[in-house]
Amino acid sequence: MKGLLKNVVEQMASLSLCTWLLAAMCTVLFWGLYHIKDNEMALSSLGTMNLFEWLIRYETIYPGKLWWFASFVLFVFILSINTLFCTLRRIRPILATILKARETKGPLFKRLMIHGIHLSFLMITLGYFLSFTKSDIHPSIILTPNGPSHKIDEDTTIRLMTIKKLFYKGHMEAMKGRIVGVDATL
């Protein structure tokens, strides 16, 4: 059983799996680009609803036209798992060596720095997944100070009370007078 688990972990962390997944993602995207050309409207509403809700709705409207997108999402998910296993497999020996030798922080940072891109990819993928699946989407909400309120659900109503522009306060002449942020009270 332990050997089987080790084999699965090695396969999930392999560079060849990563290469095949990237090739499959490119193929599926090219196929989808060709296949969706008459139904671009299906993709336009992706930003206004939950990902799974969107897949179910538009797969019934355009049967067989969006399988490539679902495949792409699946490949990105598997690639994320591959990246996680690969990064953990590479970091574990580095940390073990450093902890045994009690080296300074300099070599640790230099040796782990290369894995930052992998961790960044995982964080970006997780962020996109959470925003497409767990966020509440309220399109076309425009709030003005002391203007009308917007009812989100039975218990929640939002209204913009004040808005204040935050101007640059540093020493760079080129940035003087630029708005660098907004402070709003809801």
Image (cartoon, rainbow, N blue to C red):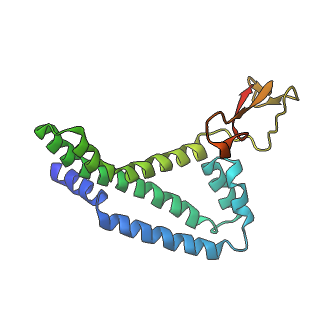
Left or right? Give the position of 41 relative to 130: right
The residue depicted at 75 percent of the width and 63 percent of the height is 41
Left or right? Give the position of 4 relative to 74: left
Left or right? Give the position of 183 relative to 23: right
Q: Nearer the viewer, residue 134 or 127?
A: 127
Q: Nearer the viewer, residue 47 or 167?
A: 167
Q: Nearer the viewer, residue 69 or 182?
A: 182
- Up-down relation of residue 146 to residue 61 (above or below): above
Count the labels in the image.
0
Q: Residue furthest right?
A: 147
Q: Nearer the viewer, residue 15 or 120?
A: 120
- Up-down relation of residue 122 to residue 39 (above or below): above
The residue depicted at 28 percent of the width and 62 percent of the height is 14
Q: Residue furthest left?
A: 101
Q: Position of residue 115 (x, y in %)?
A: 33, 51
In which image quadrant can residue 169 be found? top right
The residue depicted at 59 percent of the width and 40 percent of the height is 134
Q: Position of residue 8 (x, y in %)?
A: 26, 56
Residue 31 visible in the snapshot: yes
Position of the C terminus by quadrant = top right
- Up-down relation of residue 105 to residue 186 (above or below): below
Residue 88 visible in the snapshot: no
Q: Position of residue 17 (x, y in %)?
A: 34, 65
Q: Position of residue 161 (x, y in %)?
A: 80, 24
The residue depicted at 18 percent of the width and 48 percent of the height is 93
